[in-house]
Image (cartoon, rainbow, N blue to C red):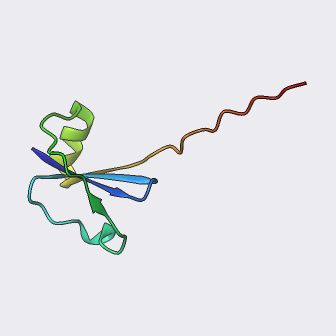
Amino acid sequence: MFDVYRNGTTNLLVLELGSPIPAAYSGKRWRKSRRRILKVSEEIKSAVQQQGYYVRSLRPTRELVVEVE
């Protein structure tokens, strides 16, 4: 199982269950997801096994702009 943390709306951090937040990312304010994640993609799983964590930037949602003439 995995723990998922979010830093506002910009970053996602995935760790193995019970692992501490890495020192490189401990200065930021992370909020833990309440859900337990049982399954992740192979890319995330391999990164967690190699590095101990997986970090990704989340894309901001785009606002729909409609021009009316």
Q: Residue at x 54, y 41 (%)?
A: 61
Give the residue drawn at x 25%, y 40%: 44
Residue 7 point in image, percent of width and height: 38, 60
In the picture, the quarter occupied by the N terminus is top left
Q: Residue furthest right?
A: 69
For the image, the number of numbered tags is 0
| Image location (x, y in percent) of residue 17 | 10, 53
Q: State the residue at coordinates (91%, 24%).
A: 69
Left or right: residue 30 versus residue 46 is right
Q: Is residue 10 above or below residue 37?
A: below
Residue 25 vs 51, above or below: the answer is below
> In the displayed structure, does residue 66 sit left or right of residue 31?
right
Residue at screen point 26% across, 35% down: 43
Residue lying at the far bottom of the rendered structure: 27
Can you give x and y, in whole percent of width and height, for residue 45 in the image?
18, 39
> Does 41 sit left or right of 61 as displayed?
left
Out of 45 and 12, give the one closest to the viewer: 12
Is residue 9 left or right of 29 when viewed as pictured? Answer: right
* Residue at the front extreme of this rendering: 68
Q: Nearer the viewer, residue 67 or 42?
A: 67
The spot of residue 13 in percent (x, y) is 30, 53
Q: Is residue 61 above or below residue 51?
A: above
